[in-house]
Amino acid sequence: MTHTPLLKKCLFLLSAFLLITGNALADETYDPDTYGPEAPIVWEKPARATFDHKIHTMDAGLDCAACHDDLFAMESKEESKRETFTMEEMAQGKFCGACHNGNDAFDSSTQCASCHFPPTEKIVFTQPVKTVVFDHSIHTGKAKLACESCHKKVFTMKQGGIEAVQPFKSENPAEKRQYLVDLHKKYCGTCHDSSQAFGYLTRCTVCHIGVKGLEQKANGTAEKETHAKKNS
Ligand code: HEC
Ligand code: HEC
Ligand code: HEC
Ligand code: HEC
Ligand code: HEC
Ligand code: HEC
């Protein structure tokens, strides 16, 4: 043992001091004047997104002036004033992208899930054919896919992408078949190719559940809700 008793005592006092100040910091209540509003800011449209002051001020140590008022006004933007608040502008270094550029903070073209939420409701495509159902929870849950695996190339983070595709009209069966193959390959079929997930040329009715299938699903949940009400 080479420690002198005095050194031991000093070390003990030092660790006791660190413990106490550590606890004091953890117990400190959140002060909005020092750190900005406590409740996260949530934009609902066009793609639900959130911003948390605490992460940026209290945790990352940024001053109010790092964002206010050059990048953002000190008020949550109304929808009508937000045409330019887009991922494209961010990629060019504006808004969140002033820091979320891969140098000062993670790049805004990665980690979509840090700022966005997946829809909880099923998405139903009704054009050109009824009714294809897409469920985020299967894909981001059980299948553990990142948002980027669909939203960077295959789909925009907005409903109506496939529906905007012009329906193809032809009497030629070969052309028609080729069009169908291409359509499926371009979207869901990028994964549903019989290797990464079940193939688009198989099990048509798993995706195309039809109007009846949708009604059945809807009635299924309606019935559950009635049961729940009866029980309570
Ligand atoms: C990293 C950037 C950033 C920093 C740092 C920051 N803010 Fe903000 N603040 C925002 C954003 C983004 C908004 C929402 C603006 C919008 O919707 O255009 C906002 C909005 C606000 C609002 C309006 C909230 C509302 O609901 O209308 C207040 C008040 C505010 N900030 C205060 C502060 C204070 C005080 C500080 C420093 C302690 C601070 N902010 C630091 C980014 C920041
Ligand atoms: C650093 C946070 C952040 C990250 C990371 C991020 N976004 Fe966003 N995104 C936002 C904010 C903030 C808005 C504007 C508010 C709104 O649209 O509700 C937005 C808007 C959007 C919009 C609508 C406007 C537009 O650009 O068309 C889409 C679509 C979108 N994001 C997709 C994505 C995708 C896909 C990813 C991942 C590749 C991603 N975002 C990553 C914060 C982020
Ligand atoms: C002034 C610089 C700056 C601006 C502007 C800024 N951020 Fe950040 N942000 C940071 C830093 C620094 C961190 C912490 C380091 C990191 O996570 O990369 C951070 C972290 C985050 C995180 C936490 C990531 C995690 O998983 O822990 C989220 C979410 C986030 N920012 C969203 C946003 C959104 C949304 C906006 C725009 C409304 C925005 N930020 C604008 C600097 C900034
Ligand atoms: C397997 C593919 C896939 C994955 C993974 C995925 N999405 Fe989607 N998402 C879609 C499809 C398909 C649509 C509808 C697009 C269309 O109609 O063109 C959509 C639409 C959306 C919309 C728009 C909803 C609306 O009402 O307009 C948001 C927001 C969204 N996704 C967020 C997310 C987020 C956040 C994640 C990651 C946590 C995620 N998505 C992961 C396929 C995916
Ligand atoms: C990024 C890859 C990817 C894309 C794009 C994708 N999926 Fe999937 N999907 C998967 C994976 C992985 C699974 C889980 C494995 C499986 O069931 O084969 C899955 C599962 C499913 C299931 C559940 C099957 C079951 O047996 O319960 C349905 C339904 C489905 N996807 C529909 C769609 C539809 C509709 C689209 C297009 C709008 C789509 N998917 C786009 C990867 C993807
Ligand atoms: C992985 C999901 C998935 C599978 C499996 C699938 N489809 Fe599709 N299909 C879609 C989506 C998404 C669309 C475009 C949205 C819509 O039309 O509602 C579509 C569109 C179509 C269309 C309309 C094209 C147009 O422009 O008129 C036909 C016809 C079709 N599918 C037939 C089939 C047949 C036949 C099978 C089985 C051999 C099949 N699909 C399997 C997802 C799927």
Image: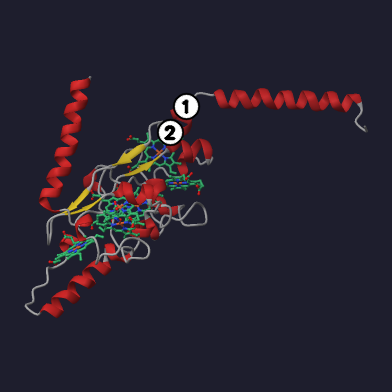
The structure residue drawn at horizontal position 9% and vertical position 80%, both measured from the top left corner, is 172
Query: Residue 112: x, y in percent?
Result: 39, 52
Q: Looking at the picture, which amino acid does disc 1 mark? A: Asp
The structure residue drawn at horizontal position 60% and vertical position 23%, both measured from the top left corner, is 24
Q: Which residue is mark 1?
A: 31
Q: Which residue is mark 2?
A: 36
Picture layout, residue 10 above or below residue 148: above
The structure residue drawn at horizontal position 24% and vertical position 43%, both measured from the top left corner, is 121
Q: Kindly state the secondary structure of the residue where label 1 is placed.
A: loop
Considering every residue shown, the one lying at the far front of the view is 203
Query: Residue 13: x, y in percent?
Result: 78, 23
Query: Residue 168: x, y in percent?
Result: 12, 72
Query: Residue 38: x, y in percent?
Result: 41, 31
Residue toward you, 220 or 187:
220
Q: Is residue 191 left or right of residue 218?
A: right
Does ligand 1 reach within 8 Å of label 2's beta carbon?
yes
Residue 88 visible to an observer of this rendering: no
Q: Is residue 91 left or right of residue 180?
A: right
Q: Is residue 91 left or right of residue 7?
A: left
